[in-house]
Structure formats: C-alpha cells, structure tokens
Amino acid sequence: MTVFRARGLAVAAGMMLSAAAVSAAPVPGAGFQKDQVAQAGPLRLVPREREAPASEAAKPDQLPGLVPGGPASPRRVIQDIEVNTLGGLDPDEAGTLYPDTGGLGAALWNGMPRDDIERLVQRLPVTIQSPTMRDVLRRLLLTAAALPPATGGTGGRLLTMRAERLQAMGLLGSAAELVAVAPNRATDAALQRLSAENFLYRGDIGGACADSRRQDQRLDALFWQQLLIYCQAVQGDTSGAALGANLLAETGQLNDSLFFRLIDRLVSGNAVTVDSLAKPTAMLLSLMRTTNVPVPADAVDQAAPPLLGMIAASPKTPIEIRLAAAERGALHGAITAERLAQAYASVEFSKEDLNNAMSIADVTRTPRGRALLYQAALVHTVPTARAAVLQKALKLAHEDGQYALMVRVYETLLIGLSPSNELSWFSVDAGRALYALDRADLARHWLDALRQVSARDPVAGVSADALWVIASLAEMTTETAGSETPVPATVPVAAPVERPKQVGVIPQRVESAAASGLPAQPPALSVRTEPAGATPKVVIRTDTPAADAWRAALRETEPETAARRISDAYTLLTSAGVVVGDAEWRVLLGDSGARMAVTPDPAYRAMLLRASQQGRRGETVLLAALILGESGLAEMDMTVLAEIVSALRMVGLGAEARRTALEIAVQAGI
C-alpha cells in the first residue's frame, strides 16, 4: 500500500507543482457533455426592458441613469412599469427563465424583504415528493426577477443559494444553467465548487478536472486539493497523485481514510472493500465508480437526491441497491420515471419468475419485486394479461404509498391499452391511473365504456361514480381553476414587456399589477376568472346527480370512512374554486369526528394567507413548499393542503393549483 507521508515539503508549493502538471496534461472526457449548456455569443441574463415611446424618450440633455449617490435621477414610466435609477448589476437578479419561457415574472419578489427571501430559500426542502410543487420551485429558482437592494454587501449570495438548492434537489441541468449565467461565476468560490460537483454528479470527470485547472489560487481549499489529486490519478500521473496525497495526509486536514484508500487503489491497484458509507459525497461515489468499488446498502439511506442518481448508475453495485436508489431518486424527482423503468427492465429474471410475477410480488414488496412486475407487464402482449399485471402493480403501489410514482412508470403501457368489453373489469383502474397522469382525454374513454356495462352490472356503475372528484379536478380547465380575482367584461390587456437590452439589467421595481400578472389588491371571493358572458368548458357543482351518485358510491363501498372522505373532498374542491353549498356541508355535521393530522407552525399558515391575498407570488411559493416539507402530501392535514391550493390560485398559478389538487386527491384516494 502506498504510504501517504511527506517530510520537508511545503504543502502549498507541492500543490502548485501538481496543478501545473494537471494543466499540462490532457484530461479524459474533457469538453462539453450532453447535459452541459453551450452558449454561443453574448449571454442575456434577464428580461429586456420595453422601449419607451418617442414622446417619453430622454431628451438629449438628460441622462437615463446617474451614478448612485449623485443628484436625483429622472424616472420613466413605461406602460405602467416604473423604472428607477439603475445601480450596479446585482448578480442575484440573473436567471434563465422569463415570463414567456416559464418564469414566474419580473415582480416575483415584490413586497418581500431580501433577508427573508434568502432565509426561506436557504431552508427549502430538497426531497419534495409533489411533482407539481417541485416544478414550481424549479421555475421560481430559475426566474430572473428584480430584488430589493442587498444589505451589507451580500450581493451574489442569493444566486448561489438558488443554484445550491437546485443541485441539492437533483435538478442538475437547471443548476448548471443557472451557474452558467451568473455574472460572478468566475470569481465566486461557492459557484465554482457547485460547478465542479455538478460534473461529478453527472459522471463527467473531464469537466470536473477542467474546473480544477482553473483553481490555482484556491489550492488551500480541501475540496480542490482532493479533486486535483483525483484528476492526476485518473489521467495516469500516479507519482503526482501520490505526492499530492502524501502532502494532504501530512497536513491532517482530511479525516477521511476512504478517500486515501481509493486514491491508493488508483495509484497502485490495491484492493478496497467498503462495508459502510454513512456519509456519501460526490467525490467518494465518483472515485468508487472509477475504481469499480461497490456502494454499500447504507449509503442509500443517507444519500441526497443527486447522490441517489450516482448510486443507481454505479455498475459494480448490487442491483438491489441500485434499484433502491433509483426508486428513492425517482420519488424525489432526481431520476425520471422513464429512467426508473429502464432500471427495472435491466434486471435479469428467469422465465419461471416472470410467469409467477404477481404471486411473487405479493410477498416480495421490494424494488426487485416491483421490477419483476414491470417486466411481466412488458412481456405480456395479450391486452387482458397485461392489464392483469398492471392492475396488480397499481394495487400494490397504492398499498405501499407509491401510486403516484408507479402510474408514471407504467404510463406508456397504460396509454397503449384501449377500452373494450374484455377489459371492462380494468376500466376503473385504468381511468383512475390516467386521471392521475392528467390524461383526462384518455381516462374519459374508459369511464364511458364502463358506464355502458353498468346497465347490466350495477357494481360497474358504482365504481365509475366513485371517481367523480378526481375526474372533476382532471377535467377542470385553467380558467375554472384559476385566480380568484374577478375579471371585468372588458379587460385592458397590457402589451408584453420585452427583455432589457442591457445584459444583466432588469427594472429594479415593477409596480404595475397588470405588467406583473399579479392581483392589484386582495382578491374578492369569486369562482370565475373568465370575462362576463364567457362560458367555461367545465363547471363543477356538488348538488348534481353525478355528485349525488358519488356520495352514494362512497357510502356503499366505504361506509365507515365515507363522511371523512366526502368532507376532505369538499375541502379540496372548495380550494380549487368549486362552490360547495351549505346543504352539502350540513349533511356531514356530526358524521365526521376528530382526527389526528400533521399541521405546520401557525406562523407559516398566517403568512401564506397574507402573502397570497396581497399577490406576493414568490413568498407564496416559498411558504407553500416549506409547509409541505419533505414528508409530502400523505401526512399533511387536508385543510392545510387546501390552503396551499387556494394560495397558488390567488397569485395567478391556476394550472399549478389544479395539478396540486389532483395530486392530493390521488394521494388521499378521493
């Protein structure tokens, strides 16, 4: 074994020599990989400012902006957007999304103190189980938006926090894009480390080593010393890697024997066995993959979302551990459902196992058992046989609390089946799953086929009636689930605000509600958002024969829990904009008793209500994510979940509110 000791050598000097060697040597895999973002030409960071009409343009003797601290500068009002004097570029305002590309608006942070923004962003959960909330957070963290002035010279800190949260959530492409547009990316140590770690997460050692070659002035940082040694070893400079490891060991700064053992394996080929890895890191997992060392099972329990992706892709790790990592990663959004399906399909099973997949999966509630069911569904080409496997898989997923994930894994197979008389027994399962996938267009066909059967099979009709709530939420349009702010018959539509010509500059404050897309005042209570006289595509009422049939179906099939489920459904529908009449509520009085539920700190709920009523979109999204936390939808009280849906509607995120309500209904089984 190589002994990492060094005497009489200065650590910094040795590291500088090593860095010079790395700079001169080619790095395997260097250059842009598939997931990297290549930019051609000047890179715009923030929206263009709309040009002022000729009548409002500055006169020749007027300057559009003055040096901060000088005489008062003129203000221009451009289509209801008040533009004050532009100071120095604030790197925290940079982003990659704008209103026309999925961003949440330049006025995202209006009304929220900057210190509070930073404090809440830093606390955002990273293992978010709601796909809708995770996507809204991704868009929020990528949005280019104006900010209140930084205090104490903290400019640039918020952008780093945003990139770090994206990366910690496993959204590696989004994190890399945000770092790429950061004005301070060449000087900010935290952003540079995030970039190098991003390459390691994605298995791009060449990219990480290219970053390390640019860190000559930061070789006192432990991370860069480790990366430098790693890069020397993988490119064959064993003597340089050994020297660097000796120097690092001599300092005593790094208390990580596994790192030195893995470097020793790269340098001298000595065997390494890892029985436990309670604190996995991108560096260690990358080294283990490079040296073909299996990852132990306990690493999955403590791994953050991006690390789960690395474990799932580790070729020498036992398949059971890789599948467990892939499932957890997919649950938290770091791995796509398609990639999890590929992992399931990669497992080898005997023909006998595939023929008995449903009985085996019943008693083997493990990732391997779920992979067996998936492969059984793949190999069956007869629709009735495939539907039977799908029905079993969805039933077990619901029992195991993985239904929302598994419907996405089986999406392609579900869409490939068509309703028929032979599959009438599968219609309810198919309809529920397709509604959960927000494919109301396909789910509707299955329920139509089921109702045709109900004439001779009353049970089929009851089953179809039980899906009324989830079907109603899936069929809602953005208009009927939109903001609660009433819209007058004639609405003056402001022209879209273009992005500013100055790279990295955005208006410091957007005062106009029309331009920002947010309510100008606390919204009045109303269900409609369409202009007077317009007819929405779907109008939901709870006093119709369909709603009566749904209530009757619940009381027939689940008499002990019917009142609670109906109450939860009313609460959720109300938050989505449906008016539930007094008569419907009164029927439940006395039938639904007290229940145990998880509720957040009252301060969060109070501020969520105030932020949403006053149109503070950024604050509303942050608080909603913090309230949900990492536990997800299953453990939260329905009243709190409904408050989140309502808050999203109030700040103009009607489509996101509807999808969140749909997720809640699927999770709650209502």
Image (cartoon, rainbow, N blue to C red):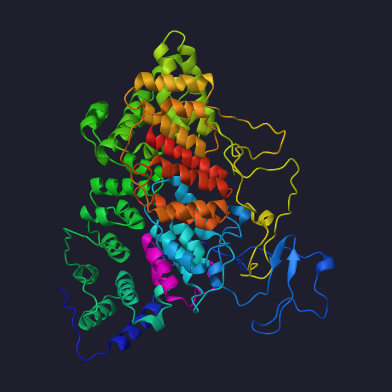
Point out the image quarter for the N terminus: bottom left
Label count reads 0
What is the x, y in percent for residue 646? 51, 44
Q: Quadrant of residue 94?
A: bottom right
Residue 434 painted magenta: no
Choose between 85 and 247: the one closer to the eye. 85
Q: As rendered, which of 430 and 374 lies closer to the eye?
A: 430
Residue 371's image quarter? top left
Picture quarter with the C terminus: top left
Residue ranking furthest to the top: 456
Q: Is residue 130 above or below residue 11?
A: above
Can residue 559 be seen by looking at this rendering?
yes
Image spot of residue 562 (x, y percent): 37, 26
Q: Nearer the viewer, residue 189 or 29?
A: 189
Task: Examine the rendered structure and indicate whether residue 27 appears above or below residue 634.
Answer: below
Q: Is residue 201 magenta?
A: yes
Residue at the location (30% across, 49% down)?
325
Query: What residue span does the magenta drawing correspond to?
Result: 181-210
Q: Residue pushed farthest right?
A: 55
Q: Position of residue 167 (x, y in %)?
A: 41, 60
Q: Main secondary structure of the magenta part?
A: helix
In the depicted structure, whether residue 446 falls above or below residue 506: above
Which of the pair 92/635 is nearer the observer?
A: 635
Asked whether residue 626 appears in the rendered view, the answer is no
Image quarter of residue 202: bottom left
Q: What residue lies at 56% left-to-right and 69% top-to-bottom?
A: 148
Q: Is residue 624 left or right of residue 367?
A: right
| Left or right: 124 in relation to 521 | left
Return the x and y of residue 528 as percentages of the image width and height: 63, 37
Seen at 52% across and 59% down, the residue is 142
